[in-house]
Image: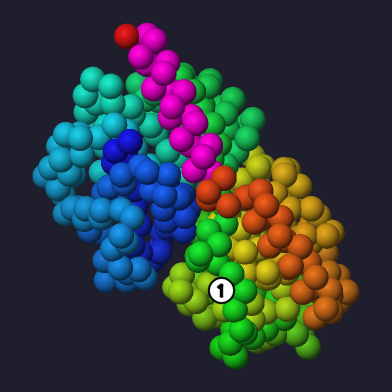
């Protein structure tokens, strides 16, 4: 199948948390024989902050971030596409692409809306009676999301989705694996995440407050946007961490912290990429609590779960190098057995085959 995918960026993770998800999933789909073309706008300085070269498993089509640019890109995509994908959060001309892609289908072409931030999208649709997706969602053949389970599926069904299925984040074992620790990332607890409005309060609770209460321990804050954030003296703000350094970042800490954004924690069943990256690197994960975590990792054995910042402090007190290593190894084994992008690509291919059969039957 020729898959033409409009997303934020495949080659740059700069202010683009979906990059790991796109790379792992689309590479796995390519290995199953699908032909991938990824269309991304030349925007937000992402082309100046590439962390991978154009891969051999996908064609990268960078288009100008202009009205003419996206229109020419879509005209090119529709010529041969069997599947047109519009991802949420492209960043420029999202409204125009959302509306144009269902109309760009040829006979037999499928159109999918792929939401990489479904909780936030559904909240926005619910709160805005004029939101464009209220009338656009029924025009797509299906909605796929990278998380959410029943609350997200039910939400999209309510707005007229013909079909909706979560395609969760996963581990790409070729990209994320154990490596030797690096001094620049050594600490007791690390956290990697860009500064975002619905994440900041939770970072304060689960990361900065524990640091204040743990004067004898070292903390490392990775991600963009934290430069002017007041932080305790035992916290080092590293700034943006490229994907090539993620393994070392996770492997160099006694434990690494996952903090779901507020909307994702509220919906549940929305594990971010760092859960799978860190587990793949055999890092010991401490996560905030959210419904559905046990679908991916076993609390207490494969991941440690904290209900608040005080619990993070207590978990760190009880953690040894040996126990942390044991938790990390079990997490990696679970991911390899059940949660790789190869597993997800098989799921996507089956869904696409089913959609194609339904279309043929209805023709």
The residue pinned by badge 1 equals 247
Q: Quadrant of residue 254?
A: bottom right
Q: Residue furthest top?
A: 362
Q: Is residue 269 magenta?
A: no
In the image, taking residue 217 as reference, residue 339 lies left or right, namely left
Along the viewing direction, whichever of 259 and 202 lies nearer the viewer: 259
Q: Quadrant of residue 235?
A: bottom right
Along the viewing direction, whichever of 183 and 15 lies nearer the viewer: 183
Secondary structure character of the magenta stretch overall: helix
Crowd tier of the residue under label 1, counting other residues whose Cα lies within 10 Å: few below 14, some 14–19, many 20 or above:
many
Q: Residue furthest bottom?
A: 183
Q: Quadrant of residue 219?
A: bottom right
| Residue at x-position 70% and y-position 76% | 189
Relative to 33, residue 158 above or below? above
- Give how far across and how far down residue 147 sits, in percent: 57, 42
- Give how far across and how far down residue 15 sits, in percent: 40, 63
Magenta extent: 344-362
| Residue at x-position 28% and y-position 26% | 109
| Residue at x-position 25% and y-position 55% | 60
Quarter in which the C terminus is drawn: top left
* Mark 1: secondary structure: helix
Q: Is residue 222 visible?
A: yes
């Amino acid at each position: 199948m020729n898959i033409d995918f409009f997303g934020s960026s495949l080659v740059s993770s700069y202010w683009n948390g979906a990059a790991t998800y796109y790379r792992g999933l689309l590479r796995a789909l390519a290995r199953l024989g699908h032909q991938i073309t990824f269309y991304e706008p030349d925007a937000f300085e992402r082309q100046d902050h590439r962390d991978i070269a154009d891969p051999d498993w996908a064609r990268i089509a960078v288009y100008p971030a202009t009205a003419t640019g996206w229109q020419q890109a879509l005209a090119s995509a529709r010529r041969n596409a069997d599947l047109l994908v519009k991802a949420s959060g492209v960043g420029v001309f999202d409204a125009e692409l959302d509306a144009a892609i269902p109309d760009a289908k040829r006979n037999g072409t499928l159109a999918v809306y792929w939401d990489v931030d479904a909780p936030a999208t559904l909240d926005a649709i619910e709160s805005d009676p004029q939101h464009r997706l209220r009338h656009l969602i029924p025009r797509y053949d299906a909605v796929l999301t990278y998380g959410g389970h029943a609350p997200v599926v039910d939400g999209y069904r309510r707005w007229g989705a013909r079909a909706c299925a979560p395609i969760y984040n996963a581990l790409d074992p070729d990209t994320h694996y154990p490596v030797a620790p690096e001094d620049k990332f050594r600490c007791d607890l690390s956290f990697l995440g860009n500064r975002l409005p619905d994440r900041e309060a939770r970072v304060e609770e689960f990361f900065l407050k524990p640091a204040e209460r743990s004067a004898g321990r070292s903390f490392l804050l990775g991600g963009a946007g934290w430069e002017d954030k007041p932080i305790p003296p035992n916290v080092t703000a590293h700034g943006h961490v490229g994907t090539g350094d993620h393994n070392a970042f996770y492997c160099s800490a006694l434990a690494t912290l996952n903090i779901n954004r507020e909307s994702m924690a509220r919906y549940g069943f929305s594990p971010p990429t760092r859960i799978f990256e860190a587990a793949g690197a055999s890092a010991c994960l401490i996560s905030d609590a959210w419904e559905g975590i046990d679908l991916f990792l076993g609390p207490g054995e494969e991941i440690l779960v904290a209900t608040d910042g005080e619990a993070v402090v207590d978990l760190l007190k009880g953690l040894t190098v040996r126990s942390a290593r044991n938790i990390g190894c079990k997490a990696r084994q679970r991911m390899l057995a059940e949660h790789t992008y190869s597993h997800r690509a098989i799921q996507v291919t089956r869904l696409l085959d089913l959609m194609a059969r339904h279309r043929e039957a209805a023709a």
